[in-house]
Image (cartoon, rainbow, N blue to C red):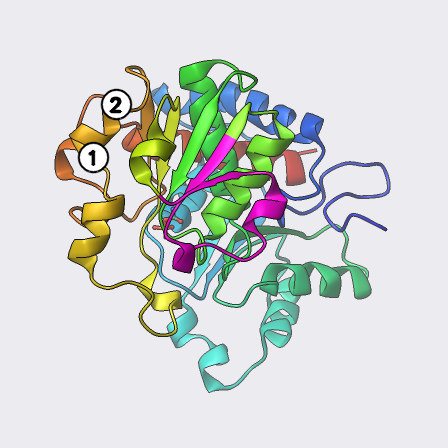
Amino acid sequence: MRNPQLNANGELSHLLSIEGLPREVIIHILDTASSFLKVSTRDVKKVPLLRGKSVFNIFFENSTRTRTTFEIAAKRLSADVINLDVTRSSTAKGETLLDTVDNLVAMHADMFVVRHAASGAPHLIADHLQRIGRNDVHVVNAGDGRHSHPTQGLLDMYTIRHYKKSFGELTVAIVGDILHSRVARSDINALTILGAAEVRAIAPETLLPTEIRKLGVRVFHDMAAGLRDCDVVIMLRLQNERMNGALLPSAREYFRCYGLTPEKLALAKPDAIVMHPGPMNRGVEIHTEVADGPQAVILPQVTFGIAVRMAVMGILAGN
Ligand code: CP
């Protein structure tokens, strides 16, 4: 079956999910990001790779990190960036997503960066562009429903590689609301493709998807057992906005069982790193001493995210 993310030459045409990406494409993105990391430290933080291109940020869900770092990344590549204000756009008057896309294509869009509450919305746009013969317009998924958040997955892999150098020996624990997490899915897919030794999912049964064991991860309900000897701990937020009904007794009970405290972190390897995609809820999934502690690499994740998003956009549209 045709991979909708790759063109006929096997090159990346859209970034819709980590699933289905060849390992060499992921490595190429991470290596390209390494070269872009230096751009952000120069006096003139710009390269001309996307000069003359128009990047449309279309965010139907709230975002701080993803939206801002995509905008910074596009500007550092010299693109023109248009942030569609969805609440004031004509989608609020009933215009369909694809009609909106058609109108933006008529304004000579070269790339859409899309966040949507509906899983599959970026795929829908990519399929539509193919149907109307606009293979020159690229789509980047900036998070769709519970499905995928591929640039978060890639920046997480960049962060792990930066601190741990390679994946083959690593035990990585993903902790918390895996059921509702597009980040967890993207991270599990990426870690599997990159050959991590062991990926663990630590969560109560109510916050695990039924298919989790088919993804090749080791499931733990007991956090102490799951954290033992880990190299990387990825904490997740409780995504209350995607929960239908109560899946937990209380936030206090959740923190007692699954919150990352300094005592629990001491069970992982002494040089383990702590990651979080943000936004963090201190005192719910992570103790503030851990969030601000020496093992946390949560803010470097954000910085690396700019370079990774520059790499993705540069590879898609930079010739
Ligand atoms: N990690 C992440 O997607 O954060 P935002 O929702 O702030 O973009």
Mark 1 lies on residue: 291
Label for residue 295?
A: 2
State if disc 2 and disc 1 touch (CB < 8 Å).
Answer: no
Quarter placement of the C terminus: top right
Position in image of residue 289 (x %, y %): 13, 32
Q: Secondary structure at mark 2?
A: loop
Residue 62 visible in rendering: yes
Label for residue 159?
A: none
**In the image, is residue 71 above or below residue 120?**
above
Foreground residue, 234 or 20? Answer: 234
The quadrant where residue 222 appears: top left
Q: Secondary structure at mark 1?
A: helix
Q: Residue flagged by tag 1: what amino acid is it?
A: Ala
**Boundaries of the magenta span:** 199-221
Residue neighbourhood size for the residue with mark 2, other residues' Cα within 10 Å, grouped as few (<14), some (14–19), many (≥20): some
**In the image, is residue 86 above or below residue 52?**
below
